[in-house]
Amino acid sequence: MSAAALSPAPAAPTRRDATARTARRYGTFALRRTGQALLVVLLAYVLVFLVLAAIPGDPISAQLENPQAGYTEEEKAQIRAFHGLDRPVLIQLLLALSQAVTGQLGTSLATSQPVTAMLAAAIPSTLALALTALLLALAIAAVLGLASRLLPTGRAGALIRSLPAVFLSTPNFLIGLVLIQVLAVQAGLFSIVEPESIGATLAAALTLAIPVSAQIAQVFITALDEAAGQDFAEVALARGLPPAQVVLRHLLRPSLLPTVTIVGLVLGEVLGGSLITEAIFGRAGVGTLVQKAVAAQDVPVLLAAVVLSALVFVLVNLVIDLFYPLLDPRLRGTEETR
């Protein structure tokens, strides 16, 4: 008998080995996605900085060149040097990047206040508005999606399926004005002069949530319809399971994958819509800060606000990318081999 025949056979891989291998591959995938997200934020910062630097004019130059200001040439040079406007654009970019890494976003050209402090004062209001709007949008989309499957086919079902298109075609500002007229003026549920109150925040969030929920609901309804046409759904119905149980136990999970994707995509609309919504309801948030910065050509504030929005958008999509393989184990192998 040969030595090869006498040698012990290699041990079969255990469940623990398979779990460890999967964890290592997922860790590599997570690190790669995180690196890509950081690169996107860096490129967004550089691109926005160069675009804003190419725009002529700024409040400092306008103030210095005003004959009534009475600045001497030496004073003008000192002020320009303080704000770094006397250096080449690439040097300004490198200095701004080095400061941004440490959390220093420069000084406002219009108010001479630290941009970090201005954002810190504006973020809580916008964050409360955006999170409340996103939760309301998810709730509305979930109700519309589940109702489209659970309600009997007919006028009620057709009405539910038509609501997302109606919500999507209605302008944001029109929804806000209607809610102010109905809820504040006629019903008196909140006061217009108190935009940060709970009632005003809910009304503003609902203004932002209605058009956003339409996109999520459309994808959710389509995903539920596709899942309902699969063999496993027909088998579940043939077994006599109630429709609600079939939807919750068999249709909901496969429908979450495209729905989660659209949630990450509509986040940009939530952030962009906050500017209009804050203007309608008189809220002092990031949107109002950006509006004033655009009017004053305040480049550091605009740069910080735009990059902050890009950072939030990239982080949310990164979380969704990392959550995808956990939601559907079938995607782990596909993602890990890329």
Image (spheres, rainbow, N blue to C red):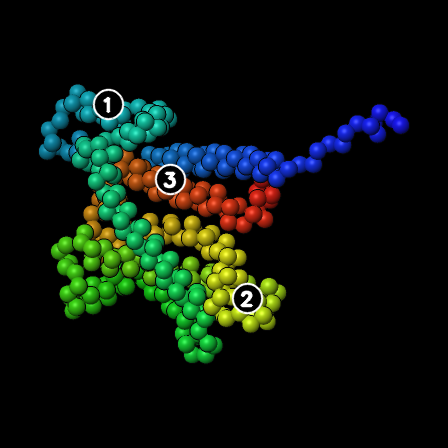
Q: Nearer the viewer, mark 3 or mark 2?
A: 2
State yes or no: discs 1 and 2 in contact (Cβ < 8 Å): no
Nearer to us in this view, 157 or 76: 157
Going by the numbered disc 1, the residue's amino acid type is Ala
How far apart are labels 1 and 3 at the CA level? 30 Å
Question: Which residue is painted at 42% across and 79% down in the image?
Answer: 155
Q: Residues within 10 Å of mark 1 (few under 14, many from 20)?
A: few
In terms of secondary structure, where does tag 3 sit? helix
Q: Residue 15: where, in percent of width, then height?
A: 61, 39
Q: Which mark is residue 81?
A: 1
Of marks 1 and 3, which one's residue comes earlier in the chain? 1
In terms of secondary structure, where does tag 1 sit? helix
Q: Which mark is residue 311?
A: 3
In the picture of the structure, the residue carrying the numbered disc 2 is 228
Residue furthest to the right: 1
Residue furthest to the top: 74
Going by the numbered disc 3, the residue's amino acid type is Leu
Q: Is residue 214 visible?
A: no
State yes or no: discs 3 and 2 in contact (Cβ < 8 Å): no
Q: Nearer the viewer, mark 1 or mark 3?
A: 3
Of marks 1 and 2, which one's residue comes earlier in the chain? 1
Q: Residues within 10 Å of mark 3 (few under 14, many from 20)?
A: some
Left or right, 7 with respect to 201, comes to: right
In terms of secondary structure, where does tag 2 sit? helix
Nearer to us in this view, 112 or 324: 324
Q: Is residue 98 visible?
A: yes
Going by the numbered disc 2, the residue's amino acid type is Ala
Q: Quadrant of the C terminus?
A: top right
Left or right, 250 with respect to 294, comes to: right
